[in-house]
Image: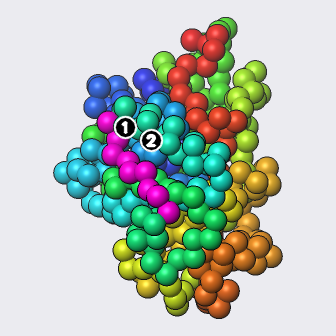
Amino acid sequence: MAMAEVVVVGGGIVGLSVAWSLRRRGAAVTVLERGVCGQGATAKATGGVRTQFGSEVNVRLSLASLPFFRRWREIHGGDAGYRPIGYLFLATSREQRDALRRGAEVQRRCGARVELLEPDQVAARLPGVRLDGVLGGSFGPDDGLADPGAAVASLISSCRRSKVRVEEGVEVRELLRQGSGFVGVRTPGGEVHANVVVVAAGPWSPTLLSPVGFDLPITPRHRQVYRAIEVDGLPPSCPFVIDLGTGVYFHPDGEGLVFGGGDREGSPGLDESFRPEEAPRVIELLSRRLPRAMEARLSGGWAGVRDMTPDDHAIVGWLPGAE
C-alpha cells in the first residue's frame, strides 16, 4: 500500500495544473494517469483561450489564467504557444446580439478587454468573409490560441522539477471511501491511500464518481475538428471566429485553417473515433461564411470527447457531504 498526501486522478492540463499549484503550497502530490499525460481530452482540444464568457466566475477564472499563459516560459519553461489573435463572435439574431452585449458588461466589470462591433466593423476585421445576416459581434483582443501538447509537455517537466510524483500507465479503478470521506484510490498495482483525492479525469470522471454515489451532471460528448489547406478568402490576420448562428468556428492554421462545431449536439458517450461522414455537414455550414471552403482540401482532423455540463461551468470543489 502506497501513501500520498494528495492524489490527483488524471494527467491532463487540469490535473497537472492542480498538482503543480498544490505542490507550490507545500503538499506532497502524486498524479496517476491511466495512459500518457495530456493524451486524453487535452490532446483533442483546439487550444482556445478566452475571457469572453457570460458568467462572472468564468471570466474571472480566465483572467486569472492569462498571466500564466503570458509568462509560461518563465514559470514552467518550454512554450505554451499562446497567441493572442483574438476571438470574434458573430451574432445573427437580436437575441444573440443582446447576449453579447450583456456578456460584455460582465467581462468589462471584471476587467476584461472586449469590443462590441457593428456590422461594418466586423466586415473591416474579416475582409473576404461573407457576413450575410450578421447583426454585430464582439471581439476580445486578449483571447487567442495555445498549444495543448506543448503546454502539457512543459508542465510535466515543471511538475517533476517541483517533486510532484507523476505516474503514467496507472489506471484508477476505484475511489476508496470510508464513512463520509475518501481515503485513496485502487489501481491494478494496489491501493494508494491519501488525505485528499482530486478527480480531474474530465469526461471519464462520472465513471469513477457514480459507483461511490455521486452522479454529477457531466455528459461526455463526441467532438470532431478538421484541418484544411488552400482556403481562399481567409484574411492573414483572421481571429478565432465563432458563428453563433451556425455553431461553426474557424481560425487560421499556417496557410490553412482549423474548423469545427456542434460540440453541444455531439452524441453522448466516450467514443473517440473519427467520423468522416460528419464532415460534409460542417463544411457546408462553414461555406456560408467562406464560400470557397467547398473546394478546400481537407488535410487532417481529429476526434475526441468533451465533458459538457448543463450550464457550461466547470465543477470545482468538495463533493457535497463528503470529507
Residue 91: quadrant of the picture: bottom right
- Residue labelled with disc 2: 104
| Amino acid type, label 1 | Arg
Residue at 55%, 19% (x, y): give it.
Answer: 318
Mark 1: few, some, or many residues within 10 Å (few <14, many ≥20)?
A: some
Give coordinates of residue 312: x percent, y percent: 62, 39
**Residue 93 or residue 228, whichever sits in front:** 93
Residue at 66%, 75% (x, y): give it.
Answer: 288
**Residue 64 or residue 212, whichever sits in front:** 64
| Amino acid type, label 2 | Ala
Would residue 234 be seen by someone viewing this image from the given angle?
yes
Residues at discs 2 and 1 in contact (Cβ within 8 Å): yes
Residue 61: quadrant of the picture: top left
Could you tell me how far apart the alpha carbons at marks 2 and 1 are, in whole angstroms?
A: 6 Å
**Residue 142 or residue 228, whichever sits in front:** 142
Would residue 223 be seen by someone viewing this image from the given angle?
no
Give coordinates of residue 119: x percent, y percent: 50, 63
Give coordinates of residue 233: x percent, y percent: 50, 85
**Residue 248 or residue 202, whichever sits in front:** 248
Q: Is residue 166 above or below residue 323?
A: below
Give coordinates of residue 45: x percent, y percent: 54, 58
- Residue labelled with disc 1: 108
Q: Is residue 141 magenta?
A: no
Residue at 75%, 21% (x, y): give it.
Answer: 213
Magenta range: 111-119
Q: Quadrant of the N terminus?
A: top right
